[in-house]
Amino acid sequence: MIDIHDISKIYQMGSVEVAALQNVSLTVSQGEMLAIMGPSGSGKSTMMNILGCLDVATSGQYVLEGEDVGQMNDNQLAEIRHNKIGFVFQTYNLLPRATALSNVEMPLMYGDGHNRRNRAMEALYKVGLHNRALHRPVELSGGEQQRVGIARALVKNPSILLADEPTGNLDSKSSDEILTVLQRLNRDEGLTVLLVTHEANVGQHTDRIVSFRDGHVVNDAPVTIPLTAGAGISSNGVDL
Ligand code: ADP
């Protein structure tokens, strides 16, 4: 689904070049759930921006569902973002005066009204918030607001969900709630989920952790669930 080969991203800061990503390769199959981790400044946001077609690499190749994204112009990139990618943000980015339902409908603005409403309700149902459809963000908990954010990302049936620190503003109970929703969407709906996090326990809820440092991938490994000391199975049940 995602095939990134040898990409680099160089920012020019006056006469100085900053290499935010250097020779990164990454392959993600449909239906995977993975975490991108690493310290501040390691290139996580740059990677997410490229994955989400918000930015393009300086060199290297990015093929998304068979399409060479690196060769596209701004309009084509916008089209890909619109049709294939759902974004979830740390701060939810909901419109405060609009209901949960209206917030979720927003990406369908140009569709017909009736169908729009049904699709938004369906997305709210998928995150278990259909019974809060007419609440405004201020009437919802942080975890519920983030579930609205996820429903809004889902409403156009994207192939990939990109979540940037989706639990960064939440307490541990709400954080678990969000991770459970994302895991369920991944396992039951086959949605490919990539999330950025700096919290190790969040990464443990995924199937695979890709670690960045200084613009390089320094580790890429399945998440293991320890059984007894020294033994483990990967989360997809394969003996390690
Ligand atoms: P992270 O998300 O892991 O904190 P970033 O991808 O934001 O890391 O940044 C990686 C490196 O690239 C850092 O050294 C950062 O200062 C630099 N960088 C990021 N964005 C820009 C930019 N727009 N212009 C110049 N340098 C940037």
Image (cartoon, rainbow, N blue to C red):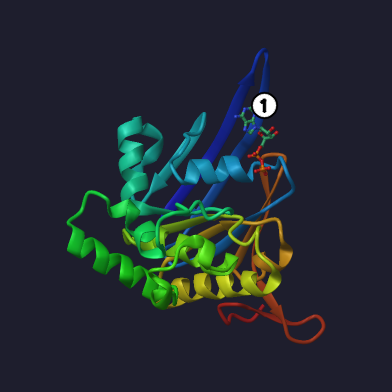
Rendering quarter of residue 206: bottom right
Is 81 located above or below residue 146 in the figure? above
* Residue farthest right in this picture: 229
157 in relation to 216, above or below: below
Q: Is residue 190 visible?
A: yes
Q: Residue furthest top?
A: 15
* Residue beneath the point at 32% across and 65% down: 120
Residue that appears at 46% across and 39% down: 54
Q: Tell me which image quadrant ligand 1 sits in.
A: top right
Asked whether the viewer can see residue 158, the reply is no
Asked if residue 178 is positioned above or below residue 216 in the image, the reply reads: below
Q: Quadrant of the N terminus?
A: bottom left
Q: Amino acid at mark 1?
A: Val
Label 1 residue near ligand 1, CB within 8 Å: yes
Q: Which residue is mark 1?
A: 18
- Provide residue 89's location: percent of width, then percent of height: 53, 53
